[in-house]
Amino acid sequence: MNPEVEAYIAALPPLRRERPVAARRTVHAAFDDIAESIEWKMPVFRRGDAYVGVASQKSYVSVYLGCSDTARRLMASDPRLKGGKACVNITDSTPWPEAALQDAIAGALRGA
């Protein structure tokens, strides 16, 4: 565990911590060879050249999957999920898509 990532999460308001912590837990449950860092002002989890980033925004969490196909598949799993090219935004009012997110994170970190 990287102390910079710990500090990022600790600095979030209590209600904003839950989802980044859940995403981090999902990453570490899927792989034991993850390197954590702060890049682009957010926690980034790397496995070789593949990465996943998680940023807490004002009213949503952005999950950067490093691959537009992976992001599109995750957004297709729930019409409430929005995003961009390789990013999925999960609003506070949208239930956390645990199973779909596990698949997306695992796929992104495998480079699929």
Image (cartoon, grey):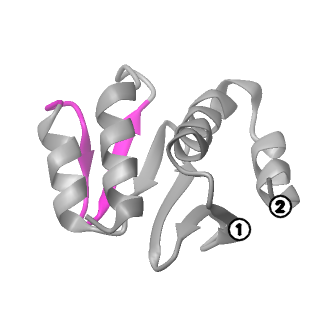
* Sequence-first disc among 2 and 1: 2
- Asked whether the beta carbons under mark 2 and mark 1 sit within 8 Å of each other, the answer is yes
CA separation, marks 2 and 1?
7 Å
The three-letter code of the residue at mark 1 reads Ser
Q: Secondary structure at mark 1?
A: strand
In-image side of 75 versus 15 (left or right): left
Residue 66 image label: none
Q: Quadrant of residue 89?
A: top left
Residue at the bottom extreme of this rendering: 49
Towards the viewer: 5 or 17: 5
Percent of width and height locating residue 20: 60, 40
Q: Is residue 102 visible?
A: yes
Towards the viewer: 26 or 87: 26
Residue 4 image label: 2
Q: Can residue 64 be found in the magenta stretch?
A: no
Q: Can residue 82 be found in the magenta stretch?
A: yes
The magenta region covers: 78-91
89 to 98, vertically: above or below: below
In-image side of 63 versus 84 (left or right): right
Q: Residues within 10 Å of mark 2 (few under 14, many from 20)?
A: some
Say which residue appears at 19% left-offset and 43% top-offset: 75
The three-letter code of the residue at mark 2 reads Glu
Say which residue appears at 39% left-offset and 27% top-offset: 98
Q: Is residue 97 visible?
A: no
Please name the residue that numbered disc 1 is placed on: 37
Percent of width and height locating residue 23: 54, 40
Say which residue appears at 76% left-offset and 55% top-offset: 5
Percent of width and height locating residue 2: 81, 59
Q: Quadrant of residue 91?
A: top left
46 to 96, vertically: above or below: below
